[in-house]
Amino acid sequence: MAVEFEPRIVGFLCNWCSYAGADMAGTSRITYPPNIRIIRVPCSGRVDPLLIVKSFQMGADGVLVAGCHPGDCHYSEGNYYARRRFAMLWPYLEYLGIEKNRFGVEWVSASEGKRFSQVVTSFTNEVKALGPRKAEALA
Amino acid sequence: MIEEIRTKARELLESGTVDCVIGYERATDGINARPLFVYDAAGADRLIFDQTCTHNLVKYLRNRKDKVTGIVVKGCDSRAVNLLISEHQIEREKAYIIGVVCPGIVETGWNKKSDKLRDICQVCRQHTPVVYDFLVGEPPASEPEVEPYPDVAAMEAKTPAEREDFWREQSSRCIRCYACRQVCPGCYCSECFVERLDPLWVGIRIAPKENEMWNSMRAFHLTGRCIGCNQCERVCPMNIPLSLLNRKLEKEVAETFHFQAGMDAETPAPFATFEKDEKIGIGE
């Protein structure tokens, strides 16, 4: 029996906006795919590119980073720095052979439970469409 | 050219302007060049400069912070000086820079040299040093117009799966000697991420995945900082094309932020600054 591919997605959510947004989705009883494993971080600026590459190296099928909308950062400017780093990391990952759609950066605020659900759903579907990473086989 | 360097070095050492001049001398095989530290005027006659002077000597400046040092730099090396000044690793006053208009460096091996310019020198757009106290040689009227990233473009034309295989094959050969890091003027962290045990970013074992983590993140840490001297690739004992990684990021930084590392010491590096309203394709 063929089992449908369920991707493993690592989600780095900023404590102040996106994590609260995920919480909002939960308390509002809005469903989203269970493929995402959420890791709470203080700020999207905390997400070192090392964390993302390491996630991929250890077998993640996708990595989603979510933080406050630009201008709303709890620490004023963390997400501006994050934005620049990810703008360089994204094409670089593709250059290393990790398809563009496997890495996502989204801005989700604390009140956007509905949006969080939509973001995770569409991201999961994109990764599902790409299939598993063949890197799995590697030691 | 050589005579000019020697005269200048002698003059600097005799007057006491500098404590030491770092330059090149002939290696024991009679063909290659090797770094030379000159401490007295008499030693200045050993200095040379030709197309085999491949090393980027700027790496040594950081170890001589308290003393004024004379240093021989080529076009690409001079950008490393600016990089280290902008990152507060060295002081401009502590370096006396003897800039050399670089004719391009040829490929060399032990006991042999070819007439072929290094790949990186074939696409060079910075033959004249960007910073110097004394210039040797006649700067060209204008830098050549060349397509700077033909190798990167060729890699980009492949499919992601092909690239993944390519990098896996390259990384599988890496022996993690870290020569690429040791030679890099931009790699000066006292504790490198690769030596961290908690978190263990790169596993201890020499396996393709761990090597890939190292090679890719070494290059990423030089985003907007790599000055393109290509020393990492030169010293790699396994001939891994490391510059393909660095140059990809260099290209992205140039396209997105219109920035080239080390061209001056004032412009902040792309990751050290931001603009609130910029549109750079993230979360839009």
Image (cartoon, helix red, strand yellow):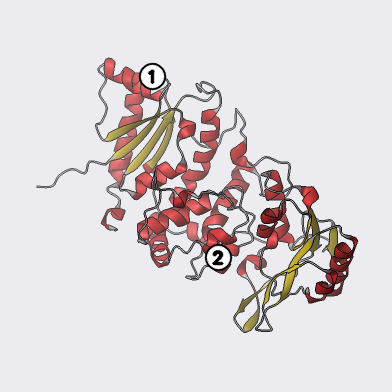
Is residue A112 positioned above or below B258 on the image? above
* Residue at 39% over, 50% down: A98
Same subunit under labels 1 and 2?
no
The CA span between labels 1 and 2 is 48 Å
Name the quadrant containing residue B143: bottom right
SS at circle 1: loop
Left or right of B273: which side holds A79? left
Chain under callout 2: B
- Closest to the observer: B76 or A2? B76
The numbered disc on residue B233 is 2
Residue B60 rendering spot, x and y as whole percentages: 67, 59
Residue A68 rendering spot, x and y as whole percentages: 46, 24
Assess whether mark 2 and mark 1 are in contact (beta carbons under 8 angstroms). no
Chain under callout 1: A
- Disc 1 residue type (three-letter): Glu
- Disc 2 residue type (three-letter): Glu
What residue would you read off at disc 1? A112
Q: Is any part of residue B72 visible from this angle?
A: yes
SS at circle 2: helix
